[in-house]
Amino acid sequence: MSTPRAAAVSRGGLDELTVVSLAHIHDPATTPIFPGDPEFTLTTAATINEDGYYLQQVSCGEHTGTHWGAPGHFEPGGALADDLSPADLFLPAVRVDVRAAAAADPDYRVTLGDLAAFEREHGRIPAGAAVIAWTGWADRWGTPAYANLDRHGRLRQPGFGLDAVRWLIGTGRLGRRGALGSDTFGPDPGSDETFAVSRELFHEHRISLENLTNLAALPPAGAWVLAGGTVNRAGSGSAATVFGLVPPRPRDGGRRRRTTRTIRHQDGRRHR
């Protein structure tokens, strides 16, 4: 029996997919480190002249650079890296463009209104999707403006609003499987030191995709993401190369008939 994943990659043939990298180069000289995380170093362990081969030693935390996070990163007893299946790392992807809002407000949170506008333009977010916020923060990579610390040493980065995440989960768009992704340190707004969004996300087998880049190469809808990386025993996640698998552009240019869709807030309010 064909699965949605098999159908996605077989339609038209694998040779018609464009593979794009959504990962930063893993380089201590440019990689911002989340405050309190281990230092990132690359040292030469062997050289061709002296040893007959070239080898580096890597030392960093599991959440350094572009990476994915496992549920056990925040959820007590949650699935760890070696509990996940490959299907947890291969997901349909949607990219929600909030660059203008994030440029105006570094503490911006993706809202239900943003999701409503996205679905009016691009259709329903598929079940078990990787919902990726394109904030434009990747342009700051390698500079202090990426962490964007205020005078009290607090992060100032955009993220997802908790109401929006609860709606994604409650409607199955983020099901038992799925992801929140961002081109920032993580799905939480930088100013939220409680990590409320991550705690909500990691209740199930859902993952995070963090410090992404090159999101301009990913269409708003219709692509898939595939996350690699080392699977550590009892790991909380892994530094990763994240790929976007982009199908050919439809002959109609990808245009969709605009529809009216209602999104209900937790408190009963609605967005159209």
Image (spheres, grey):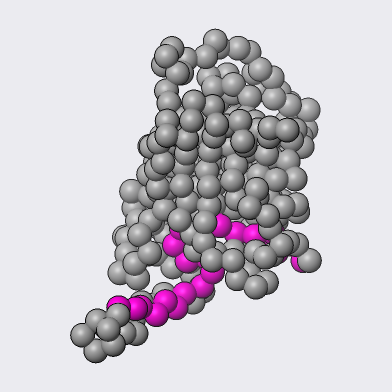
Nearer to the camera, 12 or 193: 12
- The reply to whether residue 151 is in sight is no
Q: Is residue 63 magenta?
A: yes
Nearer to the camera, 165 or 67: 67
Residue extending furthest toward the left:
49
Residue interval drawn in magenta: 54-76
Q: Is 52 positioned to the left or the right of 251 in the image? A: left
Q: Is residue 249 magenta?
A: no
Task: Residue 99: name its quadrant.
Answer: top left
188 lies above or below 111: below
Q: Is 108 positioned to the left or the right of 85 in the image? A: left
266 lies above or below 44: above
Q: Is 105 positioned to the left or the right of 175 in the image? A: left
Task: Residue 264: name its quadrant.
Answer: top right
Residue extending furthest toward the bottom:
50
10 lies above or below 136: above
Residue visible at 38% across and 64% down? 26
